[in-house]
Image (cartoon, grey):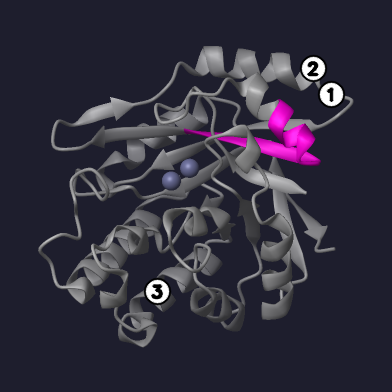
């Protein structure tokens, strides 16, 4: 099992040390994990940078990597919170550091944090969704230095009333545009099992999006739990694999030194 979305106390929203996360991963039978701690520039209305000291990060990864080398493989990635105007800053961060893997997510729209600044509130759900996906499209279009697009339908977590979510058909056209661009650029998407932790009935992305990705010729996928605590590492991994198999995927991918390797789904 290969969990490619794991946080540690290098992320502001996680209090567990890397070593505690590694112990949890070993306990949950992971073969490899990749830390993807947050770098989110220019967020909230106060334009804060949320990041970590990369020197300390790589030093710590190196320590646990060596200490637990007989039990698990540990990789060093990053989850960047993209906004189109930040592409040069992120490019610099990534070019200057030896990340194994770059997960690109969006957590903010025009500087407004989707969660903390209540992006979906007081909007018609379909308008919020279209605005979100248009923005996601611009992020993918404006940036190349990433491997995988994170939790595509993340916004679904933040509607006041889940039953108000429009049918996928109503905004399929824009998701299709994003997936086509991802495929054209040779990038991939993740299946993020944390959706269920946030009260949704599904993983990110929902099965309609996985089906569409497959139909459009998408092949590159990673599995990630988005764990912020040790016991959550590898959460629902086997179910995610089964879902991918049912949709028709034969491989997931892992990344080392920014190169991808296929792993046959068991
Ligand atoms: Zn995220
Ligand atoms: Zn995350």
In three-dimensional space, the C-alpha distance between marks 1 and 2, rounded to whole angstroms, equals 5 Å
Q: Disc 1, disc 2: CB below 8 Å?
A: yes
In three-dimensional space, the C-alpha distance between marks 3 and 2, rounded to whole angstroms, equals 41 Å
Residue 66, numbered label: 2
Q: Quadrant of residue 219?
A: bottom right
Q: Is residue 35 magenta?
A: yes
Residue 123, horizontal then vertical, whole percent: 12, 67
Identify the mark nearer the N-term, 3 or 1: 1
Residue 49, numbered label: none
Would residue 145 be seen by someone viewing this image from the given angle?
Answer: no
Compared with 143, 141 (above or below) is: below
Give the residue drawn at x 64%, y 28%.
21
Using a 10 Å C-alpha cutoff, classify the residue at mark 3 as few (fewer than 14 neighbours), some (14 to 19) or many (20 or more): many
| Residue that numbered label 3 is attached to | 175
Q: Secondary structure at mark 3?
A: helix
**Residue found at the far bottom of this picture:** 169
In this picture, which residue range is highlighted in magenta?
23-37
| Residue that numbered label 1 is attached to | 69
83 left or right of 248? Answer: left
Give the residue drawn at x 78%, y 57%.
262
Nearer the observer: mark 3 or 1; the answer is 1
In three-dimensional space, the C-alpha distance between marks 3 and 1, rounded to whole angstroms, equals 40 Å
7 left or right of 48? Answer: right
Q: Is residue 245 magenta?
A: no
Would residue 223 be seen by someone viewing this image from the given angle?
Answer: yes
Using a 10 Å C-alpha cutoff, classify the residue at mark 2 as few (fewer than 14 neighbours), some (14 to 19) or many (20 or more): few
Q: Quadrant of residue 173?
A: bottom left
Residue 203, horizontal then vertical, whole percent: 53, 63
Using a 10 Å C-alpha cutoff, classify the residue at mark 1 as few (fewer than 14 neighbours), some (14 to 19) or many (20 or more): few
């Amino acid at each position: 099992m290969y969990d490619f979305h794991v946080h540690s106390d290098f992320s502001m929203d996680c209090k567990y040390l890397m070593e505690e996360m590694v112990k949890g991963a070993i306990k949950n039978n992971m073969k490899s994990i990749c830390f993807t701690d947050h770098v989110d520039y220019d967020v909230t209305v106060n334009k804060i940078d949320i990041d970590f000291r990369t020197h300390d990060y790589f030093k710590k990864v190196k320590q646990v990597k060596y200490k637990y080398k007989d039990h698990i493989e540990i990789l060093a990635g990053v989850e960047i919170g993209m906004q189109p105007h930040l592409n040069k800053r992120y490019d610099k961060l990534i070019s200057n550091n030896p990340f194994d893997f770059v997960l690109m997510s969006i957590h903010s729209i025009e500087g407004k944090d989707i969660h903390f600044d209540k992006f979906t509130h007081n909007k018609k759900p379909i308008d919020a969704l279209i605005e979100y996906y248009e923005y996601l499209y611009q992020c993918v279009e404006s940036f190349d230095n990433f491997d995988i697009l994170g939790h595509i339908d993340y916004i679904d977590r933040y509607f006041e009333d889940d039953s108000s979510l429009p049918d996928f058909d109503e905004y399929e056209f824009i998701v299709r545009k994003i997936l086509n661009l991802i495929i054209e650029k040779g990038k991939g998407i993740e299946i993020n099992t944390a959706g269920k932790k946030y009260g949704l009935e599904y993983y990110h992305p929902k099965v309609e999006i996985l089906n569409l990705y497959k139909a459009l010729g998408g092949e590159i996928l990673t599995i990630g739990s988005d764990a912020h605590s040790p016991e959550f590492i590898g959460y629902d991994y086997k179910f995610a694999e089964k879902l991918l198999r049912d949709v028709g995927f034969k491989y997931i991918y892992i990344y080392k030194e920014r190169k991808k390797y296929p792993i046959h789904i068991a």
